Amino acid sequence: MLETRGVPSVAIGAVRVQMEKTQPPRGLFVPFQLGRPLGEPEDAAFQRRVLRQALALLERTDGPVILEDFPDDPPGWLDTPAWTPPAMPARAAPDSPGAWRTAFAAELAALRPAWVRAGRRFGRTTVGLSGLPDDAWPDLAAHFLAGESPTVHAHDTAALALRFMCDDVKAFYGEAAQADGAAPASRQIDAWFWRQTVAGQLLIALRAAAAASDNNAVRTVGGRFLVPAPWLPA
Amino acid sequence: MARLEDIPQPTRDAVVAVPCPSFDTHPFVSGPPLRQRRVAIVTSAALIRRGDSPFPFGSAEARPIPAGPVGDLLISHVSINFDRSGFQRDANVVFPLDRLREMAADGEIGGVADTHHTVMGSTDPVGMQVAADQIAGQLRQERIDAVLLTPV
């Protein structure tokens, strides 16, 4: 769409079949995870290799469609066996909105030091879409679990407040999981979050609560935008 | 990964089945050597600066990203089916502004745009002609002759 408007472009693409269908003027297919078009975080040399190969296509004249493959898997694709998840308090399965609030708040408090270390390590945090401090999340979650559609100052609708709180929860845990030592593969973080944390189970419980909501938007957000399909309960 | 067989189901089937636009023409614009070109990033990650409103669901808008510290950027994309842990560690894995600046400093590219651009990738591209016009207009105004498209 940019080329039609006179601007030369090169696309990085992680799904080869989509690039074959769209036929961009120049495309570099990369065998990387969705969400990591440059391949490897904190690896400037790897990222520059990807950029060099992509940008080099701009000097080619054998168009109108040039598709090339980047040859290497990113090193972070492999699991890190030495990685251990942050320590968390023992817990019983919560059976009421109030019990979820208490268990989630306790887990957040236990993880907070790791999350703070991650912020220092990476120089930033990606928590922030909800506009709410993390100590407000357990209460908001309990309201949704109780079948309410609470209003939140930062967002127009309860559905958006739910969605972005859950994004912030995932970001908080993802950062805490990467605070120390060698980085885990993303699937190690996902398996920990969705199978071993109160927060992962809470998001699954929020999905179930949203399905029973009389608020259409909350039902849609709960069904489609909280829990990735591979981690839904059987 | 993102070799198809590595994407978990049912996301894999959804990725294969996603409708892709086809185009009647194949425009191809060439330019000067890379070391003379100014490069801009256009990303479909729905990036925002901290404190800005997230992209609304289904948004077909384009937003400029003034070149600034990449540490202020958040992903507000609607999809939950891509990895965000890499971006949590290093924004350059989605938005490689630091890398482009290094390449410009080393003379590999001519320069880096003052303004980059973002859209939300899950939106139907058929509805994004206005966004494309807006981005292209700003790119031309800034004399950009190389665009790097990064999806998530």
Image (cartoon, helix red, strand yellow):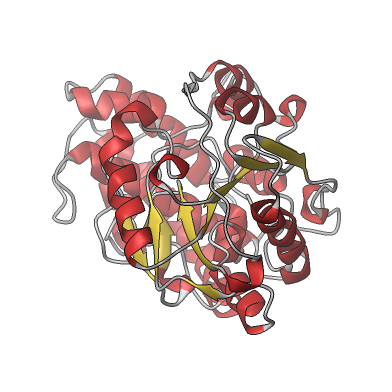
Identify the image quadrant of the C terminus of chain A. Answer: top right
Residue at screen point 74% across, 67% down:
A43
Figure check: A55 above or below A211: below
Q: Is residue A58 above or below residue B14?
A: below
Residue at horizontal 66 percent and vertical 57 percent from the top: A55
Q: Is residue A87 left or right of residue A212?
A: right
Work out whether A164 lies above or below B47: above
Residue B57: tell me if it is visible.
no
Of A123 and A100, the residue lying toward us:
A123
The x, y position of residue A13, in whole percent, is 63, 40
x and y, in percent, of residue A84 in the image: 75, 58
- Depth order, front residue of A42/A12: A12
The x, y position of residue A5, in whole percent, is: 39, 45
Q: Residue A144 is drawn in which quadrant?
A: top left
Q: Is residue A4 above or below residue A119?
A: above
Residue B17 visible in this rendered orientation of the protein: yes
- Where residue B77 sits, quadrant-wise, is top left
Query: Can you say which quadrant of the picture contains the N terminus of chain A?
Result: top left
Tell me: A216 left or right of A15.
left
State the residue in front, B67 or A134.
B67
At x 29%, y 45%, the residue is B133
| Relative image position of residue B47 (x, y in whole percent) | 40, 56
Query: Relative to the observer, which residue lies in front, B149 or B77?
Result: B149
- Identity of the residue drawn at 39% across and 52% down: B118
Q: Residue furthest bottom?
A: B105
Left or right: A181 with respect to B75? right
